[in-house]
């Protein structure tokens, strides 16, 4: 079983790997970025995110793209957000990172990466399986969940 996460960040705010690492260091998150996708305004980046957490590598499979390049996906996400009464919507000014995970260490790493993008780069997160979403409150929930999973591989 896998879980999907999405985070929309204003494309103009899409961070470098170093900026995400600094945010996570400042937040006390136990994650080291090894590879982080660079936004390509003309295409979809399918490299995912590679991190180290608790001394182990975790590959966070996913894609990054400007929202304007994936209108069908954005429509589906916005429809789901509408159904759960979220006031937020993804628009053409956003970059969207999707991550699919299946292991507890991937969940922990994803929670910290998504939270960093929300807290430091004005992101908006959404987890469609549980219909959970939000900004800083959602990030804090993810962080608490990540801390509860510590020690599970």
Image (tube, grey):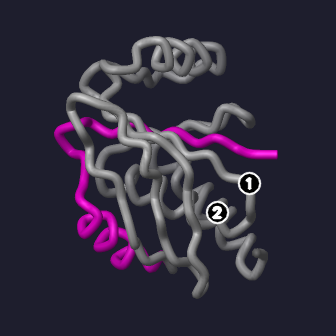
* Residue position for label 2: 106
Relative depth, front residue between 55 and 7 = 55
Task: Answer with left or right where residue 45 lies relative to residue 49.
Answer: left
Mark 1: few, some, or many residues within 10 Å (few <14, many ≥20)? Answer: few
Task: Answer with left or right where residue 85 lies relative to residue 63.
Answer: right
Which image quarter: residue 97? Answer: top left
Q: Position of residue 142 (x, y in %)?
A: 60, 57
Magenta region: which residues?
1-29
Q: CA distance from mark 2 to mark 1?
A: 7 Å
Q: Callout 1: helix, strand or loop?
A: loop
User: What residue is rendered at 33% in x and 20% in y?
Assistant: 69
Q: Are marks 2 and 1 in contact (CB under 8 Å)?
A: yes
Which image quarter: residue 46? Answer: top left
Disc ID at residue 72: none
* Residue position for label 1: 102
Q: Position of residue 14 (x, y in %)?
A: 25, 46
Task: Answer with left or right where residue 134 lies relative to residue 107.
Answer: left
Q: Position of residue 115 (x, y in %)?
A: 47, 56
């Amino acid at each position: 079983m896998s879980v999907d996460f999405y985070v929309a960040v204003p494309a103009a705010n899409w961070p470098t790997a170093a900026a995400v690492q600094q945010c996570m260091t400042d937040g006390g998150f136990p994650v080291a970025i090894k590879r982080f996708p660079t936004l390509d305004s003309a295409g979809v980046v399918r490299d995912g995110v590679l991190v180290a957490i608790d001394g182990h590598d975790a590959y966070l499979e996913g894609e990054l793209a400007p929202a304007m390049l994936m209108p069908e996906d954005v429509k589906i996400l916005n429809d789901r957000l509408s159904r759960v009464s979220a006031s937020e919507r993804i628009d053409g000014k956003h970059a969207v990172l999707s991550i699919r995970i299946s292991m507890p260490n991937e969940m922990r790493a994803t929670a910290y990466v998504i939270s960093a993008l929300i807290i430091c780069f004005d992101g908006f997160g959404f987890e469609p399986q549980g219909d959970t979403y939000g900004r800083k409150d959602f990030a804090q929930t993810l962080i608490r969940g990540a801390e509860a999973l510590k020690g599970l591989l």
